Every structure is written in structure tokens, then in C-alpha cells.
Amino acid sequence: MWLFWLIVIVAVVLYLLRKSNTSSGSSTASSSNLKIAVSSHSEMGDLETKVGFLPTSDGGFQIGPNLPIPLTLYGLDQADAAKLVAALEQGREYEIGEWFNHLVAQKNVQCKELVDWLAYAKPTIKRLVDLKRLASSEWEAATALDKEDLLAEFQNAAVEELALRPGFIETARTILFEEPNDLTVDDVLLARFKDAPDTYKSLLYAISAGPRVQVAPAAEYRRKTYEELTEKGFMRRGQEIPLEDILAGMTMKRMQEIAGSDAPKKFTRKAHAVEFLMTLPDTRQRLEKTISFRELFQLKPIEGIDLEELAKAHAYSSEVSRLILRTLRAGLESQRLKESSKDWEVDGWELNSEECCPDCRKLHGKTWKRLPQKLPPFHIGCDASIEMQ
Ligand SMILES: [Zn+2]
């Protein structure tokens, strides 16, 4: 048992070391310190678990060949694969999150295991939705808009029922239904900013909020980025923003207050409220009394780029990159457990899969005397884990 406590102490020390380094913002210091700590406890084994990678015959890379589920990635090069693997081994996947997200977007990185899952999930979802439509008493008589609403309801229920899916349901939804029509939509933008990665990053950040008017008070974290983008000509600010767009971002209640006693009646639709306020000669002056124009920012249209579609593509690739990192991270945890469990005296092992998909939930609470051969993650995005008893 003393070995177990030694491991716990080492883990806590490592965690504190990493934490203090993260807060000082130096990732190089973090990795070198970590290496020292790891090598001085090399006999522990559990801290040196390797992820590794292998090139595949069709131009991809298999990340973590010894992990419970290795992931096969296409579109990245050997240096990218090495960087990803090193970060995972050093527990820095949070720090490389942004880099990896960018890589997935820029190189349209494909994950074979995700593609395989989609090949199972998409037709299954379609079948489940069809069944729900047939069983629905409302469907036949529903209007086109109500059908849209019903369909969304059926789709959401179908994802919940899907036997095998990423544990985090929002991730499954995004991957299944939010796939952009054109995954290469951001390539034009990336090509244009390949020499200015910081501007690209800021721009992507602003784009993820969409073309709506954004309110960014001076103390807000987005403010500096927005000011820089305005300076570079990608955003407009305050008085430059069309009045109509500012009004469109307001609530009806607010517009009612601005219209005051001039409003013919209570507004019931937003479009009417905007339309009415645009007819008043002094709407701008009225607005100036209630809002600070300096706080308002709006992305300018970018020639040849569909900003809505781009925001969608960005949200999708972020989800994909997070899913890949989470799955690899979970595999590494299991592998570490496997490699170090030899030294531990434990009563047994228990599977915790309460939060995962129906297939995994069936196994929740299963126990073993010895660590089983097959360890989680059992599939891409699996949230199951093995715990010591
Ligand atoms: Zn599962």
C-alpha cells in the first residue's frame, strides 16, 4: 500500500508544479520541470507512459498505437503528430488546444474513427427519426414550420437513443447535425492570413460570434481584440455601424422604451419595431442617451467569404478537435493505470460509465478482481472510466 501513497504524493507534487508553471505562463519551463520530476521518479513507470505514433500506409498517422483506442488522423504532417503526442505525454493538451483546433481547421484533419462512427450513426439516426415521424399524430397535419420544429425534436430524441455515441450529448449533436456544407469555407481566409496568424486568430474569434453587433465594455476581455481588428479594418465601431443593425440586436422591450409615446401601439414583432424606429428622425439621438456607441463593434463583410458559414465551420472543427483530444487523453489515463497497477495492491476495479452512451451505461458498475484487458475509452468520445475499489 505504501507504493500507492507514494504515487499519490508524486502526482500531487507534479500537479502543483504544473499549476504554478501554467500560471506563470511559461510552457517551456513547465515541460522541462516536468521532465526533471519524471526522470527522478523513473522507477515509478506510471509517469512515463508513452503515446507514440505510427505512419499508416495511406498517408495518415495512428496516434497512440498502444492506447485502448488509437486514433488515425489524416491531413497532418509528421511534425504535427509529434507535437500532439509530446503534449499528451506531458499533460499539456489544454495548452495545445488552440493550436490543435487551428490545425484541424487549417488542414481539414480527418479522424478515421470519427468517420467510422458517423457511417454508423447517420443512417441509424435517420431510421430513428423516420420511426418517430410515422408514430407522430401531429406530423401529417403540421405546417411547414411546425414540421421543422417537430423534426428537430425527433432528431434530439434520436441522439439520446443512439446506442453508441460520444458521452457528451452536445458533442454528438454538433457532429451529427452542424456539419458545415463546405468544410473548406475557411481556406480562402486562411490563405489570406497565413503570414499573420495572430490577426487570423483574432478574426476567427470575432467570427465565432457571427455578424451581429457586439457590445464590449472597456473592462471586457474581448475589447482589446475588437479594437485591434477595428484598427486593421476588419470591424466597424460605434457610429460607423448601420443604425438598423444596432436596433436588430436590441430586445423589443428596449425598442419600445426608445420609441416611448411615439409608438403607435405595442410592438409585437421585432422587424416592425426596427422598421418603425428607422422612420423616426431622431432615433440616433435617442439611442445615444441610452447606450455608449463606443462599446459597439461589428464585423465587416469580407469579400468572397460567407461569415455565417465560416462561423459554423469554426464551431464544427473546434468540436472535432476537442473530441480527438478528449479521447486520446482518456486512453492515456487508462494506459497509465494499466502500466502502474502492477505495483498496487487494490481490492478490485469498477467501471464508471454512468455519463456515457446507452451501450456503455449497460456496463456501469461492472467490477473486476484484476484490471480487465479491455479498458475505456471504448469508442470515440467515450466518457467511461475504470476506478480503483
Ligand atoms: Zn459510450
Image: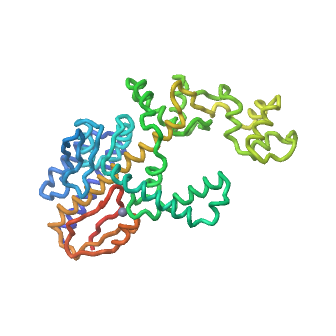
Percent from the top left, x then y, of residue 128? 48, 62
Q: Classify the position of the N terminus by image quarter.
A: bottom left
| 75 shown above or below 141 | above
Percent from the top left, x then y, of residue 231? 54, 23
Q: Is residue 97 left or right of residue 227?
A: left
Front-most of 39 and 96?
96
Residue at left offset 24%, top offset 61%:
9
Percent from the top left, x then y, of residue 329? 30, 53
Percent from the top left, x then y, of residue 240? 65, 25
Q: Is residue 317 left or right of residue 275?
A: left
Ligand 1 quarter of the rendering: bottom left
Front-most of 319 and 14?
319
When asked about the image quadrant of residue 185, the answer is top left
Q: Classify the position of the C terminus by image quarter.
A: bottom left
When asked about the image quadrant of residue 47, the answer is bottom left
Residue at left offset 56%, top offset 59%:
153
Residue 168 seen in the figure: yes
Residue at left offset 42%, top offset 56%:
123
